Image (cartoon, rainbow, N blue to C red):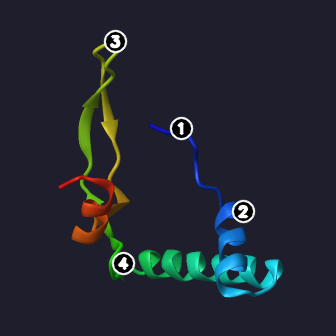
Amino acid sequence: MSNHTLTRAEVTDAIVREVGVTRQESADLLDRTLDLIGEALEQDQEVKLARFGNFVVRSKAAREGRNPKTGEEAPIAARRVVTFRPSPMLKSQVGGD
């Protein structure tokens, strides 16, 4: 198994190679795409990317947690979290049937 992490720069370079735009246009396109996804999630919208998966914002209620090291109870505030559910095609592609 590889420990390589795909970086924003590598995605930008791939867009340059595949689409044939300049590096600056590629970076701007990627930034705008990520901004649109973030803005939609901020507004509690679900983001569905066909053949990739869905990003959903979930609200988690406040609860009592426990410090695993000391066993001391500590309050955990209510919060919103982003979850990702991969599409069946992505699951199949990475072997996670």
Q: Quadrant of residue 93?
A: bottom left
| In contact (CB < 8 Å): disc 4 and disc 2 | no
Q: Of callouts 3 and 4, which one flags the residue occurring earlier in the amino acid sequence?
A: 4
> Residue 11: x and y, percent?
64, 67
| In contact (CB < 8 Å): disc 1 and disc 4 | no
- The label nearer to you, 4 versus 2, is 2
Q: Quadrant of residue 76?
A: top left
Residue topped by disc 3: 70
Question: Tag 2's secondary structure?
Answer: helix
Task: Report the front residue among 2 and 23.
Answer: 2
- Is 14 situated left or right of 51 in this image? right
Residue topped by disc 4: 44
Cα distance in 3D space between marks 4 and 2: 29 Å
Q: Residues within 10 Å of mark 2 (few under 14, many from 20)?
A: few
User: What residue is rendered at 34% in x and 81% in y?
Assistant: 48
- Is 62 situated left or right of 42 in this image? left
Cα distance in 3D space between marks 3 and 1: 33 Å
Question: Tag 3's secondary structure?
Answer: loop
Q: Of callouts 1 and 4, which one flags the residue occurring earlier in the amino acid sequence?
A: 1
- The label nearer to you, 3 versus 2, is 2
Q: Which mark is residue 9?
A: 2
Q: Residues within 10 Å of mark 3 (few under 14, many from 20)?
A: few
In the current view of this chain or complex, which residue is farthest to the top?
Answer: 70
Q: Of callouts 3 and 2, which one flags the residue occurring earlier in the amino acid sequence?
A: 2
Task: Report the front residue among 27 and 13.
Answer: 13
Cα distance in 3D space between marks 3 and 2: 42 Å
Residue topped by disc 1: 3
- Is 34 situated left or right of 74 in this image? right
